[in-house]
Image (cartoon, rainbow, N blue to C red):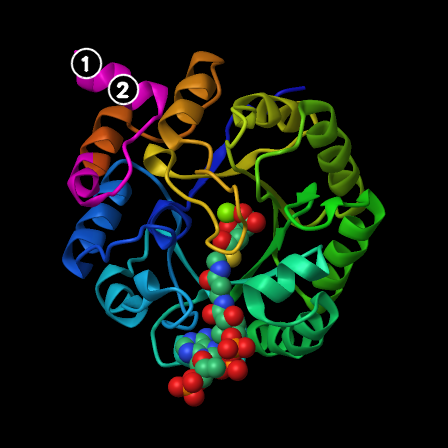
């Protein structure tokens, strides 16, 4: 049975922009975020507190956060390690996303640690965040395929998710990092996670490398998932996952859901306006179907 309502977690300001080669002015990023909030997006990844040497685009995280927090939105920031968490503590943020890959090789390329080394560092940090009343989201990368190791075992994904749930995470955001999952795999993993972790928020995060994101989202809906990470304009991709293209485009996902009679709270006209703010600064063109049809009009 399909949900009546779906929550969109907008990841455009973070996943969408982190892979952009030329630095986008901080003021433009702030206007983009404000535009997305005006469009009705209520949960959002604003930025990430990672090493500015590894990801220069996210070097303005503290400035973004200083201007973009509000009470109506769950404003999430990413942090991969103790140093990142300490930077978050210097701000007024109250929602943090930690991230780790199921694949060791991917985790090493992305965070310079094995998956277990990352978990050893993150487990006590999650406990500490919960004591401080943070909302904690755990992003699980390469949950289907890894660009270095190939197919991932479903049981390995489940046991990594279990470590996060036992550590106290409120949400699991489970990702097809390089857009290789097929709908039957999306259905299989998400039905299993729904059954396994009934009191944890479970979110699906699909990259659209092979144009299967919408089909994978449909399959996840059938598995009972009602939370999806999407990126305005279909921007995005992890700089340390070769071949990763953008996320499922927010406007295409919202369009599909609204056509299906599923409520999202997102206003498509205003969403297009938000994309227009950042579009002139991008080194790539916007390929989402909804946006292209809209600008042709
Ligand atoms: P490292 O070089 O091993 O770190 O990088 P280190 O602890 O050895 O420190 C080296 C230097 O970085 C030191 O500075 C630290 O202070 C500094 P120095 O002494 O040389 O001047 N440093 C930091 N600075 C700011 N913030 C920090 C931080 N940590 C250390 N948090 C590190 C390890 C984790 C920092 C690095 O690998 C990193 O930043 N990785 C982030 C990679 C990233 O952002 N990936 C994209 C996000 S994940 C993603 O996109 C996937 C997702 O969308 C889901 C999916 O689709 O799969 C979520
Ligand atoms: Mg991603």
Q: Which mark is residue 292?
A: 2
Q: Residue at x 74, y 70 (%)?
A: 116
Q: Is residue 160 above or below residue 204?
A: below
Question: Residue 18, image x and y in percent?
Answer: 37, 54
Whether 194 is among the magenta residues is no
- Whether residue 84 is visible to the viewer of this picture, yes or no, is no
Q: Residue at x 50, y 28 (%)?
A: 5
**Are circles 1 and 2 on residues that touch, CB within 8 Å?**
yes
Left or right: 247, with 287 as reference point: right
Secondary structure found at label 1: helix
Question: Residue 127, image x and y in percent?
Answer: 64, 75
* Residue range highlighted in magenta: 276-297
Question: Residue 4, image x and y in percent?
Answer: 54, 23
- Decide whether the magenta segment is chiefly helix, strand or loop: helix
Q: Quadrant of the C terminus?
A: top left
- Cα–Cα gap, marks 1 and 2: 6 Å
Q: Is residue 74 above or below residue 134?
A: above
Q: How many marks?
A: 2
Q: Write down the quadrant of residue 186 in the picture.
A: top right
């Amino acid at each position: 049975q399909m949900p009546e309502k779906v929550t969109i977690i907008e990841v455009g300001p973070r996943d969408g922009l982190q892979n952009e080669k030329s630095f986008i002015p901080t003021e433009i990023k702030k206007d983009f975020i404000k535009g997305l909030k005006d469009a009705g997006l209520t949960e959002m990844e604003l930025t990430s507190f990672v090493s500015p040497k590894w990801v220069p685009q996210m070097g303005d995280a503290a400035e973004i956060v200083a201007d973009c927090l509000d009470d109506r939105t769950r404003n999430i920031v990413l942090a991969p390690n103790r140093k990142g968490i300490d930077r978050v503590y210097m701000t007024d943020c109250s929602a943090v996303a930690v991230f780790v890959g199921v694949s060791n090789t991917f985790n090493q390329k992305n965070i310079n640690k094995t998956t277990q080394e990352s978990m050893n560092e993150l487990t006590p940090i999650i406990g500490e965040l919960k004591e401080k009343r943070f909302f904690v989201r755990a992003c699980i990368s390469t949950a289907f395929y890894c660009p270095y190791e190939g197919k991932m075992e479903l049981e390995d994904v489940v046991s990594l998710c279990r470590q996060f749930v036992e550590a106290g995470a409120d949400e699991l955001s489970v990702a097809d990092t390089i857009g290789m999952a097929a709908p039957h795999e999306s259905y299989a993993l998400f039905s299993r996670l729904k059954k396994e972790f009934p009191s944890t928020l479970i979110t699906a995060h699909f990259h659209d490398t092979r144009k299967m994101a919408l089909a994978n989202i449909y399959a996840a809906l059938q598995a009972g998932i009602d939370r999806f990470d999407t990126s305005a304009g279909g921007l995005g991709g992890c700089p340390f996952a070769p071949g990763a293209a953008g996320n499922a485009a927010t406007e295409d996902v919202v369009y599909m859901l609204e056509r299906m009679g599923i409520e999202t709270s997102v206003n498509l006209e205003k969403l297009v306006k938000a994309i227009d703010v950042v579009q002139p600064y991008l080194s790539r063109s916007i390929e989402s179907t909804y946006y292209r049809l809209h600008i042709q009009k």
